[in-house]
Amino acid sequence: MSAQDPRTGSGAGRLGGTEQLGVLGTLRRGVQVSPQLLQGLWVTFLLAVLAAAGKVVVPVAVQQVMDTGILADGGPDVQRVVTLVVAAALALVAGGVCSALVNVRLFRASEAGLAELRVRAFRHVHDLSVLTQNTERRGSLVSRVTSDVDTISLFVQWGGIMLLVSTLQVAVATVLMAVYSWQLTILVWLCFGPLVIGLRPLQRRVNVAYTRVRERVGAMLGAVSEAVVGAETIRAYGVQRRVQRTVDARIAATRDAMVRAQNTVAVVFSSGVLVANLVLAAVVVAGSALGVAGDLSVGRLLAFLFLVQLFTGPVQQATEVLNELQNAVAGWRRVLGIIDTPVQVADPGPRGVPSPHGPAAVELRGVEFAYPGGPPVLHQVDLTLPAGRSVAVVGATGSGKTTIAKLVTRLMDPTRGAVLLDGTDLRTVRTADLRRRVVMVPQEGFLFDATLAENLVYGLRGPGADGAASPTVAEAEPRLRAAVAELGLTDWLAELPSGLHTPVGQRGEALSAGERQLVALIRAYLADADLLVLDEATSAVDPATEVRIARALDSLTTGRSTITIAHRLSTAEAADLVVVVDAGRVVEFGPHDELVTAGGVYAAMHGAWVSQTR
């Protein structure tokens, strides 16, 4: 499990692991997370007992028909044979109905439990900090919520049923075998004893093998998804063969892990089949000897042979079920690894301090920050940004500008010190209030594969804490058009093929980079935040789009507190205040004109920029 520093709230940043949990520990933890799996268990167990009892009807009927019907003292008793056959048929039907009900109940319980598991895992992924999410490839992260849960589903819905019914069947068969011949019953268990003892080390090997399989599957999905998302870049640089080799290597590693796991499984399953055949042969020989000695009737011997089949069948299936269990446990551990990872940027929830709308003043007080496993990137930053002012943060690449933006928006928490909004530590502010008041506009906002309007609606927040009550596109369309007009983008909207209903494609690929930035600005305008944190990105757009972005920014930032990560000094010139960051320290702070006159770091940066633009 990911460790967390109690003094700073900063953890190792990696997804938690549950490898230390054994099989039973994993199952117990899984049931704690998904209690629906045990819903109505006692009723299901009773039906499973009846279903198992129905399966032993045939051996009992065979024994009775043979000993008291066909081989009766007075000759064959046809009436008794017919009665026993009809009774056995009715019992089989009843047992079949009970078995069907067991399946239905287990399916319902498992689907409810696994749905809860998916929801919790998916929600927790979003609650984790970006640092924690970035420790694992997106495809591998997705596999924990999809394919790993599927392995659990396969076991619970198939193996769980088999394990429950088979265990009861073995128990009932053992009791009846002991009734018919305690000697042969001991023989059966003596033959299976070594197998049961030998299964433990083999199951450990299967457990390790399937854990490796789940890890390889996650790595494979991560490589495949990365190659699909980056297909354009891969083609542009002509590195298809290199990427193909990487994907092929991941696929080969997954195949090899699966083959090794299946080889171990084959050993376990074959051992069960071999012992089952040996048991049957031993019972035939020993039973015949008991029959010749007069200690066992023909009917009891035939019934015992049927019971041996009922006994050995589940035992053979149990080896396969246990193998599926190991696969499921490996997947379960990976899913639980997400759920049990501490949330580093925790929402204080109802106990948090409310933060109502209003002028947003920001203060960084003794802030230090270091990324997990790396050196400090911010050193004792003390900064006060007044409300209603536009602030530009400038500095060389890697100086810490973006880190400051992430701390102000609370995508991360400082290692030391505090970030305050209107005098309140962000760590104590309710996340719902923070997200309403502070909005970050990244260099390129993520667009969903939907229409422009459906993407813009994400900027509108409903009254609920999670924004779930946001209006529909039809309800919001007048507001969307008004926002476009207020930002001076009506002419741009008119150029789109279907206006607000234009599909943007996957990740917004149907729009240009500048147009995607316009969508991000409209979203931010609709959010009506008190503080905007902007990561400037206009260097890769055409002049006409740059003018539109500048016009939209003027409307967006008017009357609001803004912090802009400035990549061009023209942005700093237009700002009320400029923050100069150098090697993780704030070295200068003040209006543009004063900093230029001071002749310090900013003056040198500005002078170099002016000379290049002439």
Image (cartoon, helix red, strand yellow):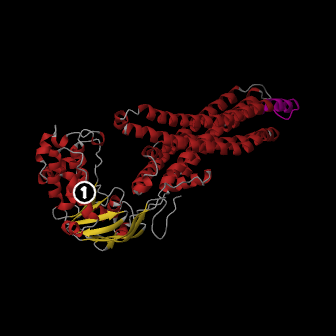
Q: Is residue 333 magenta?
A: no
| Residue designated by label 1 | 608
Q: Is residue 281 visible?
A: yes
Say which residue appears at 16% left-offset and 45% top-offset.
543
Residue 103's place in the image compared with 554, above or below, is above
In the rendering, at what x and y percent does residue 279 appear?
77, 34
Count of labels in the image:
1
Residue 214's place in the image compared with 376, above or below, is above
569 lies left or right of 279: left
Say which residue appears at 43% left-offset and 53% top-offset.
133
In this rendered view, identify the residue nearer to me: 182 or 265. 265
In this rendered view, identify the residue nearer to me: 347 or 104. 347
In this rendered view, identify the residue nearer to me: 100 or 324. 324
Magenta highlight: main SS = helix
| Neighbour tally class for label 1: few under 14, some 14-19, many 20 plus, Cα within 10 Å | few
Residue 551's place in the image compared with 349, above or below, is above
The quadrant where residue 54 appears? top right
Say which residue appears at 22% left-offset and 52% top-offset.
612
Farthest residue in the bottom direction? Answer: 423
In the rendering, at what x and y percent does residue 199 appear?
70, 42
In this rendered view, identify the residue nearer to me: 26 or 488. 488
Going by the numbered disc 1, the residue's amino acid type is: Ala
In the rendering, at what x and y percent does residue 30 appear?
53, 53
Label 1 sits on a secondary structure element that is: helix
Q: Is residue 284 magenta?
A: yes
Q: Is residue 34 visible?
A: no
221 lies left or right of 235: right
Residue stretch rendered in magenta on the structure? 283-300
Say which residue appears at 53% left-offset and 41% top-offset.
216
